[in-house]
Image (cartoon, helix red, strand yellow):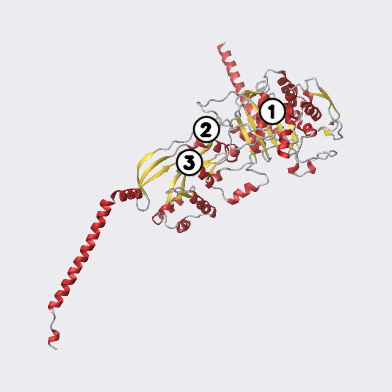
Amino acid sequence: MASDTFKDHYSERRLVNFRLWLSVLVMLIITGGLLARMFYLQVMNYSDLATQSEENRIHLQAVPPIRGLIYDTKGRLLAENQPSYTLTIVRERVKDIEATLEAVGEILPLSENELEKFRQRLRQRRPFEGVPLKYRLSEEEIAKIAVDQFRLPGVEVEAQLIRHYPYDEEFAHAIGYVGRINDRELATLDPALYSGTHVIGKTGVEKYYESALLGKPGYQEVETNARGRILRVLKRVDPEPGKDLQLYLDLDLQAAASKALAGKRGSVVAIDPNTGGVLALVSTPSFDPNPFVTGIDYKSYSELRDSIHRPLYNRATLGEYPPASTIKPFMGLAALDSKAVDRRFKVNDPGYFQLPGDDHKYRNWKRQGHGVVDLHRSIVVSNDTYFYTVAVKMGIDTIHDYMVRFGFGDRTGLDIASERPGLMPSPEWKRRARGRPWYPGETVISGIGQGYMLTTPLQLAAATSVIANRGLVHQPRLAKPSPDEKLSEPDVIQDRSAKEWDAIIDAMTDVVASPRGTAYWRIGRHLKYSMAGKTGTAQVVGIAQGEKYDAEQLEEFQRDHGLFIGFAPVENPQIAVAVVVENDSSLASTVAKKVMDAYLLPRQGKQADKSSAKLAAREGNG
């Protein structure tokens, strides 16, 4: 028993020594491994790791340019950039995007539309680009995010400039709007030009002048911490702002035209005949373009898209209507110039026209007829029978060739994103489009702007300005040319000194000034300036030969359209106007007068003030 209590010191010492040496060996191996790893990282792979470190710490960020502003002819802002705070998320700095969205949703209310739009933008984003989640944050919302920002890596509040249209519906169709870049656009855009930019011109002037308004992006190198927060800016190259545009559009005239059309579907286009500048381009009803900038919700868009009144439809450039009797001055010019008739040619109108050997009667709008009419009177009273006869004498080929000279059947080339060409029919067109021959009766009704013939309000206004200019054709424009822009010389479609111009302009003047004229009793009696014009009524549904048109018996959308073209003052034209009022044949001339009043009367007042001042100065000097 006593021997068992003695310790074996030698064995214990050997065991302790073994453990010590084993520990030293393990430590040496670990130390060697660490030194080898350090040598590999610090010496062998230094350049690669240093580059990766810099990439994690330093980022290149695009700096979007400031989009160019748009002004009216008097320098009033029509499209501006408003500062706004936007909540953005950088995908690369977020581990779980859905969890982050849920966390943000607990702090700020997020609508389904905002979440849906965000997920769409997330698919279109560029690397390390902040994707907007919520626009126009209030100060309270910014404070809430700031309090919880420590637990929201990748979530940032950024100051951005948001496009804003201060006059809402007034210029929606002319200026258009910008909207989010979609997948199709992203695939075709130059990524260098659109770095940091989330919107692009979608319609109107915004789309047509996209390259000028956009500008060029800059960039900055920033240093960030491990959580992605920017610590400092190391280098910055400023962006080049977009160019500002000044338009010929006049805010006051645009408002006057919109007010005159209030409650009606229709369009007004006003042009300065001396420059081709578009003074007003109105389509009603209209819409507010501002929700489209940051992404309109589906319900609101569906209401606009599906509305029976079609507020998204730009009637001024896309609406195609039969020109009806507004074509008669152009037909008269063509008939005189082509020698089909002369000014002394007369027709006895019994109230209808018949082709030889045909029982069908092409009715005059006045059932009992106008008796004996010449060119002048046929325009003043808008006689149909005279122009049926003239159309047959000219033939469809001659009609087509002359109408094309005035721009019918082709786009005007206006600097806007979308425009339709209308339709100036010909036998070749009908064979190609319909696979059928041209019939004589179709030539007859072409003489009064019916049948296949279609025109836009913009085309009518441009053609009217050609009459006002006695054949001089200016290219219609919305934007004023820049100082270094060279414009092409205007065309001349026929001799400006020809007496034919006098004949047509005199007749159009009497449409308004003569008691027999179709516009006299509505607008001509109290005019304070001279006006030349022409009324028109376009059928929407056909009326049987023996029946009489009765608007009260028809549904609203089946009633005739009202048209009017005109220019003033006759002796020195300053404005040419085309008006189309859908399903109301009585209002177009009144709308045109209100537009011309708004444009000309203030000018007459200023001219009178200048004359009075000069007279007073002369009397004072005397």
Expressed as whole percent of the image width and height from the top left, the position of residue 21 reads 17, 68
Q: Work out how far the residue at label 3 is from the one at label 1, CA to CA, in angstroms.
A: 45 Å
Give whichever of discs 2 and 1 has the lower sequence position.
2
Disc number for residue 245? 2
Q: What element carries label 3?
A: loop
Depth check: give the residue in front, 448 or 533. Answer: 448
Check if mark 2's residue and mark 1's residue have beta carbons within 8 Å. no
Q: Work out how far the residue at label 2 is from the one at label 3, CA to CA, in angstroms.
A: 23 Å
Going by the numbered disc 3, the residue's amino acid type is Asp
Mark closer to the observer (2, 3): 3
Depth check: give the residue in front, 227 or 574. Answer: 227
Residue density around tag 3, few if under 14, some if 14–19, many if 20 or more, within 10 Å? few
**Residue 149 appears left or right of 171:** left
Residue 1 appears in which quarter of the rendering? Answer: bottom left
Going by the numbered disc 1, the residue's amino acid type is Gly
- Residue on which disc 1 sits: 566
Residue 507 appears in which quarter of the rendering? Answer: top right
Expressed as whole percent of the image width and height from the top left, the position of residue 303 reads 63, 49
Q: Work out how far the residue at label 2 is from the one at label 1, CA to CA, in angstroms.
A: 29 Å
- Residue on which disc 3 sits: 190
**Residue 425 appears left or right of 158:** right
Give whichever of discs 3 and 1 has the lower sequence position.
3
Expressed as whole percent of the image width and height from the top left, the position of residue 226 reads 35, 53
**Residue 290 appears left or right of 83:** right
Check if mark 2's residue and mark 3's residue have beta carbons within 8 Å. no
